[in-house]
Amino acid sequence: MKFKAILFDCDGVLVDSEALTCGVLRDMLEENGWSMTLAECMATFVGKTVREERVTIEARTGQLLTEDWMQRFYERRNVALQADLHIIPGALAAVQAALAHTGGQIACASGADRFKVEMMLSQVGLMDYFAGRIFSGHEMPHSKPAPDVYLAAAAHLGVPGAQCLVIEDTIVGVTAGVAAGATVWAYCPLPEAGPALLQAGANRLFSCMADLSERLTVH
């Protein structure tokens, strides 16, 4: 199938950021009285915004989730990302394959805040591929799992959702892509995560970015 546009999530798809961000979050929540492992933190928060989990955080810590706390989280998160962020192996070639497949019709549609997305893409050398076509769920009426950020990206490119391919790695993100009417392929390096991604509506799983590059080149 030939897709007219390809829309990439960012965290966990283009950049290996989720463990770094959740590591900072886990540490700060523990400082406020909620102890958990990194794996438990990632299971709770990956694919979501911290603010979306406000009720749970306040219940588990007994403290209000204040804007001051959020700003300190952003600052510590950014330091961790700037120190240790890496591109997902093969992501550059996959983006280049997507550009060739669509004639340049690609975008990055993330649930994260714009500063974080642009900082990360710049840091790993992907910013030039997405400049002017970056969309943040923080700037939409509703973030993922609502389809808003994908619909905005598709509209900007002038392509109906049904003619878009979405590349995601989380249940929340797959749900958003499906709700936008797109075909969704899920990056799934851990086999045990596959059934849940398929149940959420992913049309296809791939375990490494080289697989994505090959599929885009063949189709």
Image: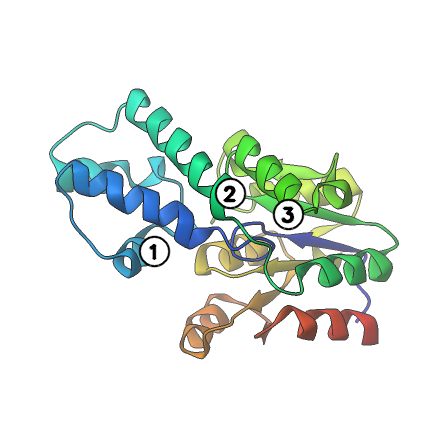
Q: Which of marks 2 and 1 is in front?
A: 1
User: Which callout, 2 or 1, points at the residue further toward the start of the chain?
Assistant: 1
Secondary element at tag 2: loop
- Whole-angstrom CA distance, mark 2 to mark 1, is 15 Å
User: Which callout, 2 or 3, points at the residue further toward the start of the chain?
Assistant: 2
Check contact, mark 1 vs mark 3: CB within 8 A: no
Q: Residue 111's mark?
A: 2
98, 148: nearer the viewer = 98
Find residue 144 and report its horizontal and vertical position in percent. 48, 46
User: Which callout, 1 or 3, points at the residue further toward the start of the chain?
Assistant: 1
Q: Residue 142's mark?
A: none
- Whole-angstrom CA distance, mark 2 to mark 3, is 19 Å
- For the view shown, which residue lies furthest in the front direction? 83
Please say if 168 is above or below 53. Answer: below
Find residue 98 and report its horizontal and vertical position in percent. 78, 59
Please say if 67 is above or below 36. Answer: above
At label 2, counting other C-alpha atoms closer than 10 Å, the crowd grade (few under 14, some 14-19, many 20 or more) is many
Q: Which of marks 1 and 3 is in front?
A: 3
- For the view shown, which residue lies furthest in the top direction? 68
At label 1, counting other C-alpha atoms closer than 10 Å, the crowd grade (few under 14, some 14-19, many 20 or more) is some
What is the quadrant of residue 94 in the picture? bottom right
Question: Which amino acid, mark 3?
Answer: Val
Please say if 26 is above or below 51. Answer: below
Secondary element at tag 1: helix
What is the quadrant of residue 219 in the picture? bottom right
Give the residue at mark 3: 124
Find residue 154 and report its horizontal and vertical position in percent. 71, 45
Q: In this view, does 73 lie to the left or right of 146?
A: left
Q: Can the viewer see residue 219? A: no
89, 172: nearer the viewer = 89
Give the residue at mark 1: 42
Question: Which amino acid, mark 1?
Answer: Met
